[in-house]
Amino acid sequence: MRPVPMPSTPHVARTTVWWGKVTSTMLASLLILADAAEEGRKVVLAMLVVGLIFIAVIALGELTHYLAVKRKSRTPSRTL
């Protein structure tokens, strides 16, 4: 005789008061929206910081190029 298999998940009783479930769902969605807004703010600030770093690297490269050209034009050329 084979043993009877156990159910994979236990039976969950349904909520008889539907408005309690709706209000808890609405509260959870408001909390998620608040978290999403805060997360979006963090993402935007991070993007701005990355953009500033990107512009700073470009400006540093252009400055070193300008100084190298200026230094090269200032030294006399040596002909042998």
Image: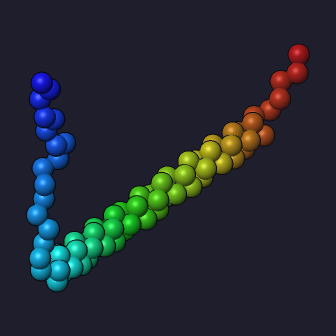
The residue sitting at 31% across, 73% down in the picture is: 33
Q: Residue furthest right?
A: 80
Q: Is residue 48 at all visible to an observer of this figure? A: yes
Q: Nearer the viewer, residue 74 or 22?
A: 22
Give the colour scheme shown.
rainbow
Instruction: Name the quadrant of the C terminus.
Output: top right
The residue sitting at 74% across, 41% down in the picture is: 69
Check the image and report above or below for 21 versus 63.
below
Q: Position of residue 23 (x, y in %)?
A: 18, 81
Q: Nearer the viewer, residue 3 or 57?
A: 3
Judge left or right: residue 37 versus residue 56: left
The residue sitting at 75% across, 36% down in the picture is: 72
Q: Is residue 45 at all visible to an observer of this figure? A: no
Q: Residue furthest front?
A: 1
Q: Position of residue 77 (x, y in %)?
A: 83, 29
Q: Nearer the viewer, residue 11 or 40?
A: 11
Q: Nearer the viewer, residue 22 or 4?
A: 4
Judge left or right: residue 9 versus residue 33: left
Q: Residue furthest bottom?
A: 19
Q: Quadrant of residue 12?
A: bottom left
Instruction: Name the quadrant of the N terminus.
Output: top left
The residue sitting at 78% across, 40% down in the picture is: 73
Q: Position of residue 15 (x, y in %)?
A: 12, 72
Judge left or right: residue 10 versus residue 44: left
Check the image and report above or below for 79 versus 7.
above
